[in-house]
Image (cartoon, rainbow, N blue to C red):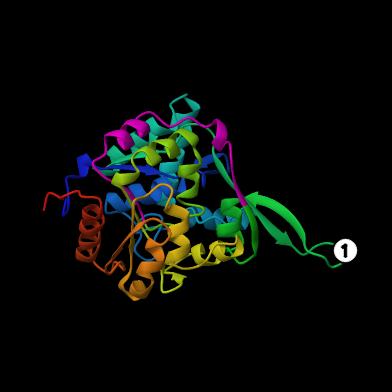
Amino acid sequence: MRVCEPAAVTAVANCGDDIVLGGLHISPDLDTITYCLAGELNPETGWGLREESWHALETLRRLGGPSWFGLGDRDLGTHLYRTQRLAEGVPLSAVTAELAARWGAEVRVLPVTDDRLRTRVTIDRPDDPAGRAARTEIGFQEYFVRLRHSVAVRAVRFAGAERARPAPGVLRAIRDAAAVVIAPSNPIVSIGPVLAVPDVRRAVVRQRERTVAISPIVAGAALRGPAGRLMAELGHETSVVGVARLYAPVAAALVIDSQDATLASAVEAEGIRCVVTPTIMHTPDDAAALARTALGAVGFASDS
């Protein structure tokens, strides 16, 4: 609302992180976006709901069940609702719209696909009898939450992406957008699954001149999470230049932080326009200023 009307915004979100635990279908990225837009996000964790309690998780732990994934008591209601609706045959995109409306999120939130899409991570597992590192493939949440992203990653793939169809409304939202903004999320495992759906990637490429990305890397590191380390482990340069190489095929402009101003010419050498501005968002005003700059980078004038 500070920059443009929420109803005019569509968030196309990653569902490659989805997982089934205890029979419940959990959509971490979709829920985090919905809770944030609704003003219900837990400010202490950056995920889940505010004013949370953990009695169900404590009981599960006492009973010896899988308790490595932090499910709060309030949050469980969302997963129970989603699981029931999916069992009734309602597609994920429709369930997501129902949840967003009930939580009070005014922005339209869409999973990139209603089809099964899962991020799979190949990691080193030092359990070979000869002492050599064996490798195994696990789900993203096992890597990110259970192992606390503390192990080396050798490969990432998006199972089901090649066959996945965009969820209803996704292609039209991209096609009709005055601007497409790639948020400063992890380019490998948050943005990667979205762009791995072939029709979605093609739609963004067709909108390249209206597409702007915001770098999640500042001064050679991610502000939070494993984005920087993942990029390095998978052979990408951990800098705004490395981000530029990833996004140049799909975005006309890249917004980088003022701390990386000296790399602006190197970014543009990758074939993408560079915009330098403060990108660290401490307050809503910071976020609004960044949004205006990002939109302006592709010629879109905000409402305010």
Q: Position of residue 107 (x, y in %)?
A: 26, 43
Image x and y of residue 85, in percent = 44, 30
Pick out the residue farthest to the right.
130
Could one spot residue 183 in this view of the protein?
Answer: yes
Kind of residue sitting beneath label 1: Pro
For the point 40% across and 64% down, which residue is it? 267
Q: Which residue is mark 1?
A: 129
Closer to us: 209 or 143:
209
Relative vertical location of residue 30 with respect to residue 217 in this rendering, above or below? above
Look at the image and say whether residue 174 sits in the magenta stretch.
yes
For image coordinates 30% across by 66% down, the residue present is 279
- Vertical comparison of 120 with 135: above or below: above
69 in magenta: no
In this rendering, position of residue 20 left or right of residue 48: right
Q: Nearer the viewer, residue 292 or 56?
A: 292
Where is residue 177, by image quadrant? top left
User: How far across and down, in percent of the image, does residue 207 sit?
Assistant: 33, 40
Which residue is at a point 27% across and 34% down the rendered structure image?
A: 176
**Is residue 168 rendered to the left or right of residue 298?**
right
Q: Is residue 15 visible?
A: no
Q: Could you say whether the residue bearing mark 1 is in a helix, strand or loop?
A: loop
Query: Badge 1: few (under 14), some or many (20 or more) residues near its Cα, within 10 Å?
Result: few
Name the residue nearer the viewer: 251 or 94.
251
How many marks do you count on the picture?
A: 1
- Residue at left 38%, top 58%? 184
Which residue range is magenta in the image? 156-183
Residue 169 appears at what percent x and percent y? 34, 30
Q: Nearer the viewer, residue 256 or 5?
A: 256
Q: Residue furthest left?
A: 304
